Image: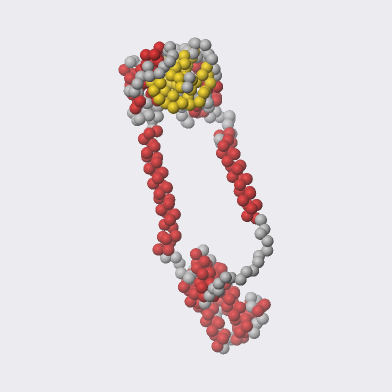
Amino acid sequence: MTEAVGATSTAPTTRQVWRRARGLLIALTILIVAGIAMAALRSGDQHGRLDPRSADQYGSRAVAELLGDRGVDTRVVTTLDEATAAMDDTTTLLVAHPDLLTVSQQDTLHTAMAASAGRTVLLSADTSLPVLAPDVRSEGPAPVSARTPQCALPAAVRAGDVDLGGQRYSSDTPGADSCYPSGGVPTLLRLDGPGSGETVLLGAPDILYNDRLDEHGNASLALQLLGSHPHLIWYLPSLGDASATPEGDNSFFDLIPPGWLWGALQLGVAAVLAAVWRAQRLGPLVTERLPVAIRASEATEGRARLYRRVNARDRAAVALRAASRGRLAPLLGVPPADADSPDVLLAAVSARLPDSDRDLQHLLFGPAPADDAALIQLADQLDALEREVRTS
């Protein structure tokens, strides 16, 4: 007994710890490297999208410089207050991502559009149409490709074929110009604005990208749409805009998307069902003969390994002491029912070994060992006590 416990109670070696943890560490390293690689690959494509200060693939610095050569001043703004304050009869307002605006921001922008005699260009507007262009309907997206004007709008006629697609628009507003159709539905729509100005809807912003500006008539159409007034306000909506979150309007739960709430509810229901399933009674335990015979030494060593894996020195000590008391009781003439009784068993051991200087109370009924060395020492002392009782 002592040999088996001593062989399986030592602390895990460095090699054992590495074997257990290397799979998790390798998987974690792969995830980190893959995440960094994907972020690095995608960051080059997404950085500065539609930003007139960016020279990247999807930036718009080229069109801003061409407008500057023609005397058009381009000003970049990131808040709604800046955009609406700069709007007047001499400005063109370009809204890069109108669908990112909240409903309250869309209302504010629509009011400013009604008071301005300038031009407003909305890029890829879809969910914002009911507020910013209530007379326009979205007819679904189309692929971006070279398309012909098929309209009488002078800017489109002069530009000729351009790369357009994306959102398609329809409107029954009199005097609207419907250009560059896809499936009979235009991807560029110009209509009179809510005031004395005008609104232009572009289904896709590709004609403004640096890498596509020199293709077909993209540059011509972009310069005509954005250079009709001496001042261009380039509005890039940002999450840091204070007007997007008015104080007192939204609670914490209002800021959580509805999909997350439904997902959390489904997870909660699934957890309850799993708990009910796992809690079902499968009936009483039925004893069954093992198909093979297992040697006692193998069972002991296997149990010891389990104790060592979870550092269960307390359980190992309880098992060692209980086994020793069970073997000592018949040797001392103590009934099996009293083997775990300190008063009866300790008195019998003291009577058999009156000259023993051991602390029998601590040895047979003491606390759990503090470390593996103390556990091994406990096993040795229990073995020694049993030998003395047998030979006395």
Residue 202 pos. (x, y %): 45, 21
Q: Nearer the viewer, residue 361 or 181?
A: 181
Residue 100 pos. (x, y %): 49, 28
Residue 351 pos. (x, y %): 62, 86
> From the image, which quarter does the C terminus lie in?
bottom right
Report the residue that reaches farthest toward the left: 69
Q: Nearer the viewer, residue 255 or 283?
A: 283
Report the residue that reaches farthest toward the bottom: 392
Q: Is residue 368 visible?
A: no
Q: Residue at x 41, y 44 (%)?
A: 35
Q: Quadrant of residue 367?
A: bottom right
Q: Eyeballing the image, is 212 above or below 366?
A: above
Q: Is residue 280 visible?
A: yes
Q: Quadrant of residue 180?
A: top left
Left or right: residue 16 versus residue 173 is left
Residue 20 pos. (x, y %): 44, 60
Q: Eyeballing the image, is 14 above or below 38?
A: below
Report the residue that reaches farthest toward the front: 183
Q: Residue at x 40, y 63 (%)?
A: 15
What colour-coding does the image apply? Answer: secondary structure
Q: Quadrant of residue 49?
A: top left
